[in-house]
Image (cartoon, rainbow, N blue to C red):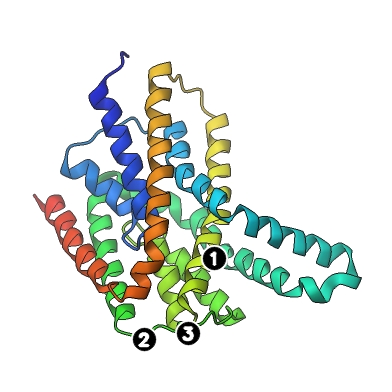
């Protein structure tokens, strides 16, 4: 397969879409599905491409949060192995424990329901995405009507449970993971900064786990990938990284500005568009 600049742009476009929509409360899976259907975008779905596309956003978040992650993990290790220093490391240890526990429902949902959803998505992917986007629109609109707390209220154990369930629900195409987890945290009374940071830290751990599973699947395949395909994949990966960073810089101010309802209108519109495309 020879190099094609148009093909390169397709992969870059999907990478940018993945990166932006992974952070903003508008569903990355729904947008990728809609983009392919709307403009007739057909790209190679080799598992290596899926791994690189999904880890583009992951790498960006690892760069953004690496200092905090190191601090959290270090506190956990000290708490476990140095009882004399548990008091000063208790808060960080509990916070990391809550993040890990919140990832469990999504992990279980992925193991039991993802194969079913993937099967349904083969023929009805655009319809499922449209329905999911309407659900996202409804949740975001409801959350936009409540008054957010400006302080950084700690995430409680009950908050952890509900946020984890919200992330599990987001396995359905078109339902925004960041939208569901952040909305749930805000509804539970968390401050904006804590809600967003907790959501993104959850994403890091659940994304590491899902990427690991994809790598295991890849080792079972014997796919032949050309050097040109690797170029396309890397461009999509870099596009996802860049777009994720830009969206991250915007998301906190968007939530604090009270403009969240516009994302609801947007998701409602493209959700209807997705269903219309499926019908015709």
Name the residue at the top extreme. 2
* Residue linked to disc 3: 189
- The mark nearer the N terminus, 1 or 2, is 1
Q: Is residue 118 visible?
A: no
Q: Residue at the spot x=26%, y=19% of the render?
A: 4
Q: Answer with the quarter of the image where residue 97 lies.
A: bottom right
Q: Residue at the spot x=43%, y=50% of the render?
A: 245
* Residue linked to disc 2: 147
Bin the neighbour count of mark 2 within 10 Å (Cα to Cα): few under 14, some 14-19, many 20 and up: few
Q: Residue at the spot x=31%, y=16% of the render?
A: 3
Mark 1, mark 3: which one is toward the viewer?
3
Depth check, front residue: 42 or 118? 42
Q: Answer with the quarter of the image where residue 141 lies.
A: bottom left
Q: Residue 126, how many percent across, how many down?
A: 23, 51
Q: Compute the Cα span from label 1 to label 3.
A: 21 Å
Query: Of helix, strand and loop, which one carries label 1?
Result: helix
Q: Residue at the spot x=52%, y=66% of the render?
A: 197
Mark 1, mark 2: which one is toward the viewer?
2
Bin the neighbour count of mark 3 within 10 Å (Cα to Cα): few under 14, some 14-19, many 20 and up: many
* Residue linked to disc 1: 105
Asked if the residue under mark 2 is in contact with the one under mark 1, i.e. CB atoms within 8 Å, the reply is no
- The mark nearer the N terminus, 1 or 3, is 1
Give the left or right position of residue 279, taking residue 137 as reference.
Answer: left
Q: Compute the Cα span from label 1 to label 2.
A: 28 Å
Q: How many marks?
A: 3
Q: Compute the Cα span from label 2 to label 3.
A: 9 Å
Query: Of helix, strand and loop, which one carries label 2?
Result: loop
Give the left or right position of residue 120, taking residue 268 as reference.
Answer: right
């Amino acid at each position: 397969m020879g190099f094609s600049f148009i093909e390169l742009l397709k992969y870059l476009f999907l990478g940018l879409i993945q990166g932006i929509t992974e952070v903003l409360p508008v569903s990355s899976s729904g947008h990728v599905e809609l983009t392919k259907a709307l403009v007739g975008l057909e790209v190679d779905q080799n598992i290596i491409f899926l791994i690189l596309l999904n880890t583009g956003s992951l790498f960006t978040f690892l760069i953004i949060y690496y200092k905090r992650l190191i601090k959290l993990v270090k506190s956990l290790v000290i708490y476990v192995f140095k009882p004399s220093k548990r008091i000063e490391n208790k808060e960080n240890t509990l916070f990391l424990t809550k993040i890990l526990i919140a990832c469990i429902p999504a992990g279980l949902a992925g193991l039991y329901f993802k194969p079913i959803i993937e099967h349904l998505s083969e023929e009805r992917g655009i319809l499922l995405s449209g329905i999911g986007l309407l659900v996202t629109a409804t949740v975001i609109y409801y959350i936009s009507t409540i008054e957010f707390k400006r302080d950084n209220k700690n995430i409680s154990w009950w908050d952890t449970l509900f946020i984890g369930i919200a992330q599990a629900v987001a396995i359905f195409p078109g339902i925004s993971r960041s939208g569901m987890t952040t909305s749930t945290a805000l509804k539970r009374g968390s401050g904006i900064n804590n809600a967003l940071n907790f959501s993104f830290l959850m994403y890091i751990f659940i994304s590491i786990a899902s990427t690991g599973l994809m790598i295991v699947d890849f080792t079972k395949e014997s796919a032949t990938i050309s050097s040109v395909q690797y170029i396309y994949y890397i461009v999509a990966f870099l596009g996802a990284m860049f777009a994720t960073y830009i969206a991250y810089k915007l998301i906190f101010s968007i939530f604090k500005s009270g403009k969240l309802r516009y994302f609801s209108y947007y998701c409602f519109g493209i959700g209807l568009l997705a269903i219309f495309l499926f019908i015709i």
